[in-house]
Image (cartoon, grey):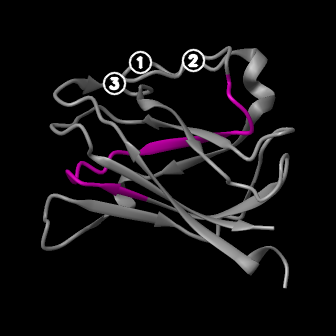
Amino acid sequence: MGYRDKVEIRTTNIATDAGNVYAVGDVIDSLKTINNAVLDDSGASFLEHLTIIDKEGFSPELQIIFFSENPTASTISQNNPLNIAAADYDKILGVMTIPGVNYIDLKPASAASAITHSDLNLVIQSTVESRVVYFCVVTQEVVTYTNADSLVVKAGISQQ
């Protein structure tokens, strides 16, 4: 049947810098990993959907940047501007923009919101001898979270 035979949902908690302001272009948390994103070393999978849960309901526009391997020459750190070095450009698999206007309010927790992008079919591929894919979350709006665990990313991956 192809790549849709095995679908996995991978959940990653994103640590928010409670009480501190994120400026446009700042990284929320740091570089994150999706372990076993592919079935075989240097394999490929499809990212079919991505869900962001904002437990505080701020719903800022976000960019999620995916990498095939650790972008070691770049600066990707909590509440600092994203700085991708030229040496890491080839490691970028894709960028997804999550528009703030597309979140929905979750009830009864009126402060929470969520958004799902589906039918993405972004090919994610790890490098030789690895099954890991990396990503980071970058805000495109000024936001200040009050709790340290305000964001959750859920990735729906179809593995080959």
Task: Classify 64 as above or below 156.
Answer: above
CB under 8 Å between callouts 2 and 1?
yes
Q: Which residue is drawn at 73% across and 62% down?
A: 46
First reached walking from the N terminus: tag 1 or tag 3: 3
Which label was assigned to residue 128? none
Q: Which residue is drawn at 38% across and 52% down?
A: 152
Please state the horizontal and vertical placement of residue 93, each as a whole percent of the image. Answer: 73, 42
Q: What residue type is labelled 3?
A: Ala
Disc 3 marks which residue? 23
Please state the horizontal and vertical placement of residue 24, each as a whole percent of the image. Answer: 39, 28
Q: Which amino acid does label 1 sit on?
A: Asn
The span shown in magenta is 52-71
Disc 2 marks which residue? 83
Does residue 108 show up? yes
CB under 8 Å between callouts 1 and 3?
no
Say what secondary structure mark 2 lies in. Answer: loop
